[in-house]
Image: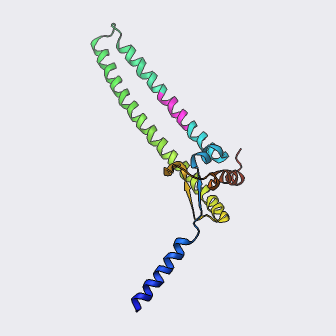
């Protein structure tokens, strides 16, 4: 008898859960990044850093090309050629290290900036979710969702909320 009551109670509880309304919303994080003033600021900052690093690397690449050109001169004696060959090898190693350092810096800065942006935006998404009565909000840009009803997309509202909270320049 006790088992039957527990079973009936469990079935009733689960049926209430199953038949409760689940309201789902979606956002497109890539669109938020591309269309909010805050997202555009982050993108511009990262692009600026990338251009700075590319310019530094281009300068080093030009040095390498000049050393290679100097090394190809037939007028060089054996000692000078050996010294320039060592210099060229050292510069290539330095160049490789600079490339690796630049890539690591870009990854770290991208993670830092996008993480900071996400921490600032998440409370706004949560506010909109609560106000609209959503049970869950998915990010369509990273979830692999193949279809969704456009009426559940709250991306535009998030963009407005982000721009209102972080007005930008």
Considering depth in this image, is 101 or 1 the residue closer to the camera? Answer: 1
Whether the magenta-drawn stretch holds residue 54 is answered as: yes
Q: Is residue 160 above or below residue 63?
A: below
The main secondary structure of the magenta stretch is helix
Q: Specify the segment rendered in magenta.
A: 49-57
x then y, percent, for residue 146:
51, 49
Compared across the picture, whether 169 is left or right of 19 comes to right
Q: Residue at x 37, y 17 (%)?
A: 68
69 vs 149: above or below: above
Task: Count the labels in the image.
Answer: 0
Residue 164 locus on image (x, y percent): 72, 53
Q: Work out which quarter of the rendered image holds the N terminus and state it.
A: bottom left
Seen at 65% across and 63% down, the residue is 127
- Name which quarter of the figure residue 130 lies in: bottom right
Q: Residue at x 47, y 79 (%)?
A: 11
In this rendering, position of residue 64 left or right of residue 27 = left
| Outermost top residue | 75
Q: How is the image coloured?
A: rainbow
Seen from the viewer's position, the closer of residues 77 and 4 is: 4
Query: 135 left or right of 79?
Result: right
In front of the other: 54 or 20: 20
Residue 158 x/y as whole percent: 65, 54
Q: Is residue 50 left or right of residue 125?
A: left
Q: Position of residue 62 (x, y in %)?
A: 46, 21
Seen at 65% across and 44% down, the residue is 35
Quadrant housing residue 165: bottom right
Frontmost residue, 118 versus 148: 148
């Amino acid at each position: 008898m006790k088992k039957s009551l527990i079973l009936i109670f469990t079935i009733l509880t689960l049926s209430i859960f199953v038949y409760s309304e689940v309201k789902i919303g979606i956002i497109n994080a890539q669109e938020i990044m591309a269309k909010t003033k805050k997202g555009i600021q982050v993108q511009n900052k990262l692009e600026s850093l990338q251009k700075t690093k590319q310019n530094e690397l281009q300068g080093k690449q030009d040095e390498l090309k000049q050393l290679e050109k100097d090394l190809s001169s037939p007028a060089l004696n054996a000692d000078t050629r050996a010294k320039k060959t060592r210099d060229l090898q050292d510069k290539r190693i330095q160049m490789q290290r600079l490339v690796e350092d630049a890539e690591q810096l870009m990854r770290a800065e991208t993670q830092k900036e996008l993480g900071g942006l996400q921490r600032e935006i998440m409370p706004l998404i949560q506010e909109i979710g609560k106000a609209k009565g959503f049970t869950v909000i998915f990010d369509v840009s990273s979830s692999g969702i193949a279809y969704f009803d456009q009426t559940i997309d709250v991306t535009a509202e998030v963009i407005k909320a982000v721009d209102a909270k972080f007005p930008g320049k």
